[in-house]
């Protein structure tokens, strides 16, 4: 078995065909795969642009705006770490719109993920299987979706994938340089998604298990220079030790609750891989190098256990595992093709395979109804009529699009049950507009009485919900 480069031409063998396997016109196939990845991601962006930005996306965009203004202290004190917003701020120089800047940044990282993964797959499995793996990443529905949203998943996935690839090379070849680079990228992943700090533990276990203590120290140096600086700053700002500002809002659950969360975490993890690809993963699992299997299993175990400690789990929190697990999928494709080749009606089987592994994922890449489009319409209405105003609403979406400031209407309504007290409180805070939707009227039924006599200047509705904009009489 040859063991060599990750991103060079030496390659190392982990599959059955070897890393010296080449494909005629391989670069053309790679260009086509990247083009497919770009097209489906652009279609997803265009199809969902009428929907509002995600709530976390609002926070990322505001942090990026603070970075662009030079308010670095404000950016670091925010709920989310500043690494992904930094790239939004850079993209904003070229596109001029904060939401579009975030989408463009995620799109670039999503395409880079396909190429970087292809380089690793090629050295590990050979060019043919590398193209298989790259195509899987190009059409994977959740990777496509997060490549078009103002969320940190696209960047975190790229950084964590590079972390795994470099660690595997350093671990197998016993090269401290690549382990140090892996630790550095894991530190950057932490500055993107703080929960990935826990993966220093499984990586360190793999090194300590082979008594490579110096390499373990090199791996942790990046933590000292990157992650620890950020943690120390949070300590100075908040007075408590934490790995991110979000921990104040999302603390860990008790151990008993964490145990009951494990089945849900496993379910969402498997769903993130996507069921058709999960079948291929199982078929190719045994063909992959046992060391890569060991590392992957340990990372998955830590992922499930750590994620069970938080209050909830979704597919979003497991999507970073898709790229390096796609290596197993790439190994499973030849096994599956060999199996279906035994059937008599090969054309019909090939058609079914195409539907299952290509068409089905493509139909899931685009979500035409991501929601909160009415809130976006209300915010754009206020942007045209009174930009920069102070707005009371259930969500910060309207104020984000109106380039104004947000007052939490739901909290104010809960704390102040009387109409006069609520309106006086909003007026004293300089609120000019109140945005009402169907959900807040259910949570605070008495708020309708408070709106009598206030002019409704805009009304947006569909078959399921509505959003109305009221002007307060405080001018």
Image (cartoon, rainbow, N blue to C red):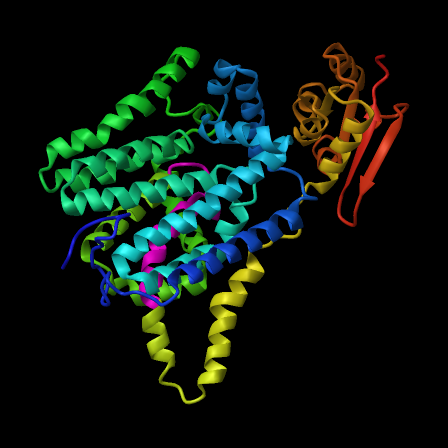
Q: Is residue 56 above or below residue 115?
A: above
- Residue 322 on the magenta span: yes
Magenta-drawn segment: 308-332
Image quarter (top left, top right, bottom left or bottom right) of the C terminus:
top right
**Residue 408 located left or right of residue 277:** right
Q: Is residue 431 visible?
A: yes
Q: Main secondary structure of the magenta part?
A: helix
Q: Nearer the viewer, residue 268 or 412?
A: 268
Q: Residue at x 49, y 16 (%)?
A: 72
Image quarter (top left, top right, bottom left or bottom right) of the N terminus:
bottom left
Q: Position of residue 26 (x, y in %)?
A: 38, 62
In this view, which residue lies farthest toward the left?
Answer: 211
User: Toward which corner of the image does residue 308 lie, by quadrant?
Assistant: top left
**Residue 60 located left or right of residue 219:** right
Q: How many marks?
A: 0
Q: Nearer the viewer, residue 475 or 252?
A: 475
Q: Nearer the viewer, residue 454 or 206?
A: 206
- Residue 448 on the magenta span: no
């Amino acid at each position: 078995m040859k063991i060599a480069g990750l991103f060079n031409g030496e390659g190392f063998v982990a599959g059955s065909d070897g890393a010296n396997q080449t494909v005629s016109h391989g670069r053309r196939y790679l260009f086509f795969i990247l083009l497919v990845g770009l097209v489906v991601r652009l279609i997803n962006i265009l199809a969902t642009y009428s929907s509002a930005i995600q709530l976390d996306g609002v926070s990322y965009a505001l942090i990026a705006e603070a970075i662009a203004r030079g308010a670095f202290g404000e950016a670091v004190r925010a709920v989310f770490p500043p690494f992904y917003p930094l790239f939004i701020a850079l993209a904003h120089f070229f596109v001029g719109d904060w939401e579009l800047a975030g989408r463009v940044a995620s799109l670039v990282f999503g395409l880079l993920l396909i190429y970087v993964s292809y380089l690793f797959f090629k050295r590990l499995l050979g060019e043919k299987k590398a193209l298989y793996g790259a195509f899987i990443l190009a059409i994977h529905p959740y990777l496509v979706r997060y490549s078009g949203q103002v969320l940190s998943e696209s960047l975190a996935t790229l950084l964590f994938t590079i972390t795994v690839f470099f660690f595997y090379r350093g671990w197998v070849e016993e090269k401290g340089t690549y382990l140090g680079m892996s630790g550095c990228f894991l530190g950057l992943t932490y500055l993107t998604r703080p929960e990935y700090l826990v993966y220093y533990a499984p990586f360190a276990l793999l090194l300590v298990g082979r008594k490579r203590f110096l390499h373990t120290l090199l791996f942790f140096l990046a933590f000292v220079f990157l992650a620890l600086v950020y943690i120390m700053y949070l300590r100075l700002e908040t007075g408590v030790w934490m790995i991110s500002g979000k921990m104040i809002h999302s603390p860990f659950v008790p151990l008993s609750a964490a145990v009951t969360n494990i089945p849900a975490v496993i379910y969402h993890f498997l769903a993130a891989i996507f069921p058709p690809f999960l079948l291929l993963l199982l078929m190719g699992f045994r063909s992959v190098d046992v060391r890569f299997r060991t590392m992957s299993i340990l990372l998955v175990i830590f992922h499930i256990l750590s994620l069970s400690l938080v209050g909830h789990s979704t597919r979003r929190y497991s999507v970073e595992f898709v790229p390096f697990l796609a290596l197993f999928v790439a190994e499973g494709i030849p096994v599956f093709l060999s199996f279906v080749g035994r059937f008599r009606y090969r054309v019909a089987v090939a058609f079914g395979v195409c539907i299952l592994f290509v068409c089905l994922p493509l139909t899931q890449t685009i979500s035409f109804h991501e929601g909160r489009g009415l809130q976006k319409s209300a915010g754009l209405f206020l942007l045209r009529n009174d930009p920069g105003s102070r707005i009371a609403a259930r969500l910060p979406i309207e104020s984000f699009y109106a380039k104004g400031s947000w007052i939490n209407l739901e909290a104010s309504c809960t704390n102040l049950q009387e109409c006069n007290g609520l309106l006086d409180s909003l007026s004293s805070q300089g609120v000019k507009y109140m945005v009402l939707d169907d959900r807040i009227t259910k949570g605070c039924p008495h708020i309708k009485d408070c709106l009598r006599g206030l002019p409704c200047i805009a009304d947006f509705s569909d078959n399921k919900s509505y959003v109305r904009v009221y002007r307060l009489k405080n001018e």
